[in-house]
Every structure is written in structure tokens, then in C-alpha cells.
Image (spheres, coloured by chain):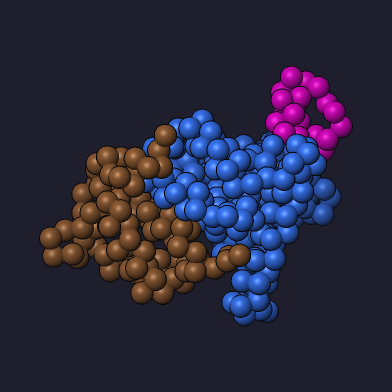
Chain colours: A blue, B brown
Amino acid sequence: MYVFWAALFTAILYYFDYRKNHDISYFTNHSFLAWRTPLGLFVLIYLAIGLLIGGGYYFGIDIGLNKPLPEMVKQFFRDGTEPPVFVQHIVAGSILAYTTRILASSKAIPGYDGTIDGAVESLLKGEHDEKNIEDIRYEGKKNHIQKLLRQYRKNNNQAMDVNILVDRLRTYLKQTGTYNSPENAVLLEGLEKETNVETAFFTLATAGFPKRRLQLLIK
Amino acid sequence: MEASISKNSTALKVLLLKAIYELSNVITDPRLDKDELLIYLKKKYSIPFLKSEESLVELIDNGLIVQSKDGSKVGINEKWQQTDFAQSVLI
């Protein structure tokens, strides 16, 4: 039951976050709703379980998880009047929700942008200087790009080249409706001039093209 | 291969244009303070002023960005799609 309330409260907290920011990209980029990250996935599963238990509870199906608060917590209320189980659930749920939200949002880890890269980077920041982070980021990108290129070669029996990449990028941008924007024109123009496909991918990644979308271009 | 933004002119130009969207409500009019843009890029991506400035000049030359008469404010050219640059890229 706690999980149900937690899920509900988390949803409400996020609604207020959304109201404050007025930007749907804030949601998908900077929160645990960036669900492809391990943290986001965890929260998603947790929300699903919460809703399942909550739904079950109200329809009278006890799947064995609707336990009241543990003894230790009950001790706290022992001498006074114990609040109804319902209230206990709400309190516990809201605490859980708020903790999750803080942990999942950028507030818990400074500089965390909701991505795995971001998490590693912000955790490393304390111990390493900027140069090292730059190196790690560089290596990470390089490995990822090389993996993508190998994947393409395996699937298509030919190596990726700049022309294929630019073609695919054009198609992708047309599909997403962002083809006619100046920054994408600059991107296409820059990529067309490249001769090395790996460098072209690097330019894409450096220009802020997300990893997940790079993957789409390879498929 | 260059993963550093300030050394990758294409990436730098893309981020500069995106920064204009982020900083300015009215983008198709030269209303964004140029210094504000340069400081933003410096703070967010540690791009040296000189590099941002070079990139800005290039975008102005290409006709994607317009600047106010005194050169202190910038914005995106409303008719950028009609420039030679855009014509050569957009198919």
C-alpha cells in the first residue's frame, strides 16, 4: 500500500514540477521519466507495482502486500491514539515519494542530467579534475560510436560511410519535423564536409545529439 | 576526432543556435544581447569567447543569424531558408 501512495504522491509532485517548468522536455530529459536510465526504469517498475497493489486493494483483491506498518514504526504511536492504517499508509507513502523524487531529480546529485553519462560524470567530479572527465567522456563516446559502426557493418555487410549517415539523418529529421531548422541545416552542412564517418559521428555527439538517437541512425 | 566543442566548428554552431532558442523568447528578431549569448556558452560549455565570436561571425556570413545595427544584439534570420547556405543543404 505504501508503494501505491508513493506512486500517487510522486505523480502529484511531478505534476507541480511540470507546472513550474512549462516544458515537456524538462520532463523527459531531466527527470526519472527519462526512463531509459536504470533509475528511470526502476521508478517505472515501482510505479507499476504501486498502481497494481493500489488497484487490487480497492477492488478487494489482497495479493499479500497490503500489510500495515511494521511494529517498529507502530511503537512510535503506541502511547497515543494510533492513527488509522489508512493515514499511516499516506504518511509513509508521501515520505517514500518525496525521497524518491529528490533522489531521482537533479537535486540529489549536482550536475546530474538524468543520463548515465551525467550520473557517472557528476559522481566522478568530486575526485577528478575537468581534464579527466573530458577524457572519460571522450573515451565513452568513442567506444559507443565504434560499437555502433561495428553493429552497422554486421547488419548490412558493408561499412557505414558519411553519405549513408547524412541520408539517414535527413530522413530522421524529416520524420521528426525538425528538418527545417537552422541548427539542423548547419549540422547537415558540417557533416557533408566530413570524410571520416567516425569523425562525423563525433560531431553529432558533440553537438548534443543523444546517444539513443545515434542508435536509431544505425538501425 | 574532436570531442571538445570549441574545436568542433559544426558542433559549436549548432549549440550556439540552440542557445539562442534557450535565451530568447523572440528569436527571429535581433533582440538577444550578444554578450549574454557568449557568457552563456562560456558558462555552460566552457567555450572561449573568441571561439563563440568566430562561430557567430560565420553564421552571420551564412545569413542564418542577423544582428542589430550596432552589432550588440543578435537573432535568427527570419528568412534563413532563402539563403544560399540553406538552399545548398535543404533538399
Q: How many marks overall? A: 0
Considering every residue shown, the one lying at the far right of the view is A64
Rendered view: A14 above or below A208: above
Q: Is residue A157 at all visible to an observer of this figure?
A: yes
Rendered view: A26 above or below B71: above
**Residue for point 44% across, 45% down:** A184
Horizontally, residue B67 falls left or right of residue B69, namely right
**Residue for point 47% across, 46% down:** A188
Q: Is residue A33 at all visible to an observer of this figure?
A: no
Horizontally, residue A55 falls left or right of residue B21, namely right
Observer-nearest residue: B39 or A28?
Answer: B39
- At which x and y percent is residue A132? 65, 76
Q: Is A49 within the magenta?
A: yes
Observer-nearest residue: A74 or A96?
Answer: A96
- Quarter of the image containing the C terminus of chain B? top left
Q: Is A218 within the magenta?
A: no
Rendered view: A135 above or below A17: below
Residue A142 placement: quadrant:
bottom right
Observer-nearest residue: B16 or B21?
Answer: B16
Considering every residue shown, the one lying at the far left of the view is B69
**Residue for point 69% across, 54% down:** A145
Magenta span: A48-67
Residue A121 placement: quadrant:
bottom right
Horizontally, residue B75 falls left or right of residue A194, namely left
- At which x and y percent is residue B74? 24, 58
